[in-house]
Amino acid sequence: MLDIKYLRQNLEHVRIKMLERGQEIDMGRFTALDTQRRDILQEVEVLRSERNAVSKEIGEKKKRKEDATEIIARMGEVSARIKTLDETLKQTEEDLNAFLMVIPNVPHESVEYGTSSEDNPVIRTWGEKPVFDFTPKPHWDIGEDLKILDFARGAKITGARFTLYRGAGALLERAITNFMLDLHTRQHGYLEILPPFMANRDSMTGTGQLPKFEEDLFHVEKTDYYLIPTAEVPVTNIHRDEILEEKDLPIYYVAYSPCFRAEAGSYGKDTRGLIRQHQFNKVEMVKFSQPETSYDELEKLTANAEEVLKRLKIPFRTVSLCTADLGFSSAKTYDIEAWLPGQEAYREISSCSNFEDFQARRGAMRFRRTDGGRVEFLHTLNGSGLAVGRTVVAVLENYQQADGTVVVPEVLRPYMGGLEIIR
RNA sequence: GGAGAGAUGGCUGAGUGGCCGAAAGCGAGCGCCUGCUAAGCGCUUGUACGCCCUAAAAGGUGUACCGCGGGUUCGAAUCCCGCUCUCUCCGCCA
């Protein structure tokens, strides 16, 4: 959510920034609601003030056994008026809030203007693409041939976009997860979290999934709960409605979780393989920082995610999302794209974002300055470190051999009982 | 699933209709005192929103907030209703 005072004072600037994202915002409606709210607020507060004063007077009169029936009657009318105004005020605030809640974040000044993912500038490229003396296979063929991925049975058990892992496949997924958690906790200074895999409406609203993107979520019937689409939701909401001490910042958390996405509107896209599933595993890094250091933290966070691919020796490139491709809550996002030889394409494997105070404002996440004691919104960041299923894809495709077997990356072998080749 | 108890400021804990944004203690901050440390003394110590002032802060002022949402009343932390969460006991269960 944007700062309402900032919005008031920068109407045109925000309008243009939203247009760059491809969003038309009706600023007239905002101004009307905002003005109406303040007008009613002022009127009702004057009346409340009067009621407070006179009620005190009534109390004193009664104590002195004086007659107060006349002013009691008058205050009855004032109270009735307050009640009416309160109802209008409540409605206006709801409308205003609903309006603000669906306005995306303002892109950071360093974010380039663009109209699609084609316009995302490449920031850096790492690694040598493997050269094969045979035609590399896509991971779904590799996985099925080795009997480590079973798409047909996943679909039988549940439905499309669900996969059954077997044997070395299941072990590989688990090994990658543990390797990444160990790297981030032991080398990069993150505290491991194991969060709930369902979250309530307030949490979903805090991080920005709701109210706008309800159709992307799985809702659990007869409850207020949603399956989390990413560990970002429960982990960022750890500090919802809290005031932290500045000395405790920055805070680094890392969490493994399964992620559940309805993938509405992606019919026909990536229908084969592990790339786009309704359920997948992810290791997520989440940071809380002071505003002045959040962009340094974003660079470090992105480097932490890249380090996973470097250690796995998988080629990748990092792009900066342009205005049109930027997520709803994000001010700036780097996507890390791993090279997939089977598809001859770079595919997203991590997304690292700085939300600035956008989520903090929605979720009332604040901190108190050591110097001066002022309370301010903090900045939240997160990034995949990495998407586990897609890392399995990258390993299978980059480490495949002519005979259909797959070499296990060296850093994963300790996590797989020393296994060197999946055959 | 059944029965009961509870939810107050950073923490502990008073408060059963007006004198309560809220006692007291602890903690924290500032100052005084003491050769250092400790003790002692004094003061300060929530958040949000609106308005005034300001370049912006600071400051002033008003309103709201005692788990959340309604209700009664001139007036609610306090009375009534609903909900959520926590704890205890019973049942069930990994």
Image (cartoon, rainbow, N blue to C red):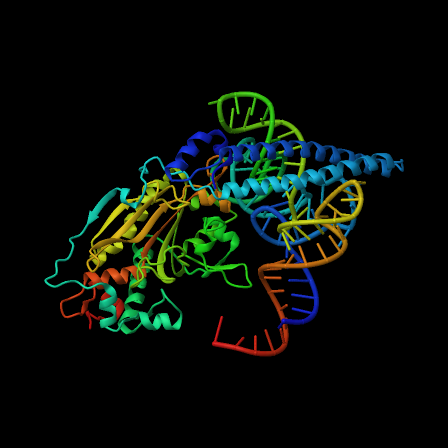
Q: Nearer the viewer, residue A225 or B21?
A: A225
Instruction: Please state if A248 lies on the left or on the right of A339 as rendered.
Output: right
A262 shown above or below B17: below
The quarter of the displayed image where residue A295 is located: top left
Instruction: Please state if A372 lies on the left or on the right of A143 as rendered.
Output: right
- Residue at the location (57% across, 41% down)? A95
Residue furthest to the left: A133
Residue B9 image point, x, y percent: 59, 46
- Residue at the location (21% across, 62% down)? A397
Residue A323 image point, x, y percent: 34, 40
Residue A259 image point, x, y percent: 40, 60
Residue A412 image point, x, y percent: 24, 64
- Residue at the location (43% across, 38% down)? A24
Instruction: Please state if A423 lies on the left or on the right of A243 as rendered.
Output: left
**Residue A70 in sight here:** yes
The quarter of the displayed image where residue B4 is located: bottom right
Q: Nearer the viewer, residue A80 or B88?
A: A80
Instruction: Please state if A286 lies on the left or on the right of B92 as rendered.
Output: left
Q: Nearer the viewer, residue A170 or A91?
A: A91
**Residue A366 in sight here:** no
